[in-house]
Image (cartoon, grey):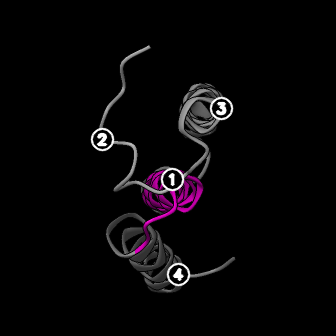
């Protein structure tokens, strides 16, 4: 079994990469991918803490499954908005998509 500090360190690195993707990138797709990485890191923390505190409980796995479903829905809606904005303005840069009128 992997120890808790290793899981937390990996989740911290993952969260840092996701934060860089959100704050440092100008492409909308990269920003959405950064948000997904940050959510994945938070789910990894949840699983790590629940396995460390309650090794036999399965409720954490169900919670993470629900969170993964919400992540998929968030990604689908985000990518649909990006595709719609790209069709309208022919760019996927965050700075150019300040106007979201139809």
Rendered location of residue 38, percent (x, y): 45, 59
> Is the stretch drawn in magenta largely helix, strand or loop?
helix
Question: Does label 3 or label 4 sit earlier along the sequence?
Answer: 4
Q: Residue at x 39, y 43 (%)?
A: 97
Q: Decide which of 36, 10 is in the foreground and name it.
A: 36
Q: Please indicate, yes or no, whether residue 65 appears anywhere in the rendered image.
A: no
Residue that protrudes farthest toward the front in the picture: 89
Rendered location of residue 20, percent (x, y): 39, 76
Q: Return the residue at label 1.
A: 28
Which segment is the magenta one? 25-49
C-alpha distance separating marks 1 and 2: 12 Å
Q: Return the residue at label 4.
A: 10
Q: Please indicate, yes or no, whether residue 95 appears anywhere in the rendered image.
A: yes
Q: Decide which of 58, 82 is in the foreground and name it.
A: 82
Q: Return the residue at label 3.
A: 87
Q: Residue at x 32, y 69 (%)?
A: 23
Q: Return the residue at label 2.
A: 98
Q: Nearer the viewer, mark 4 or mark 2?
A: 2
Residue that protrudes farthest toward the top in the picture: 102
**Image quadrant for the C terminus?**
top left
Q: Nearer the viewer, mark 4 or mark 1?
A: 1
Above or below — where is 56 with respect to 88? below
Question: Does label 3 or label 1 sit earlier along the sequence?
Answer: 1
Question: Does label 1 or label 2 sit earlier along the sequence?
Answer: 1
Callout 4 secondary element: helix
Is the residue under label 1 in contact with that under label 3 (CB below 8 Å)? no
**Image quadrant for the N terminus?**
bottom right
């Amino acid at each position: 079994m992997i120890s808790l500090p290793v899981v937390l360190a990996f989740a911290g690195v993952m969260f840092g990469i996701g934060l860089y993707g959100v704050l440092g990138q100008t492409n909308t797709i990269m920003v959405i991918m950064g948000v997904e990485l940050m959510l994945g890191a938070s789910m990894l923390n949840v699983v790590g803490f629940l396995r460390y505190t309650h090794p036999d409980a399965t409720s954490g796995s169900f919670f993470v499954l629900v969170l993964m479903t919400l992540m998929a829905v968030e990604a689908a809606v985000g990518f649909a908005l990006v595709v719609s904005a790209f069709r309208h303005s022919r760019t996927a840069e965050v700075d150019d998509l300040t106007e979201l009128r139809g």
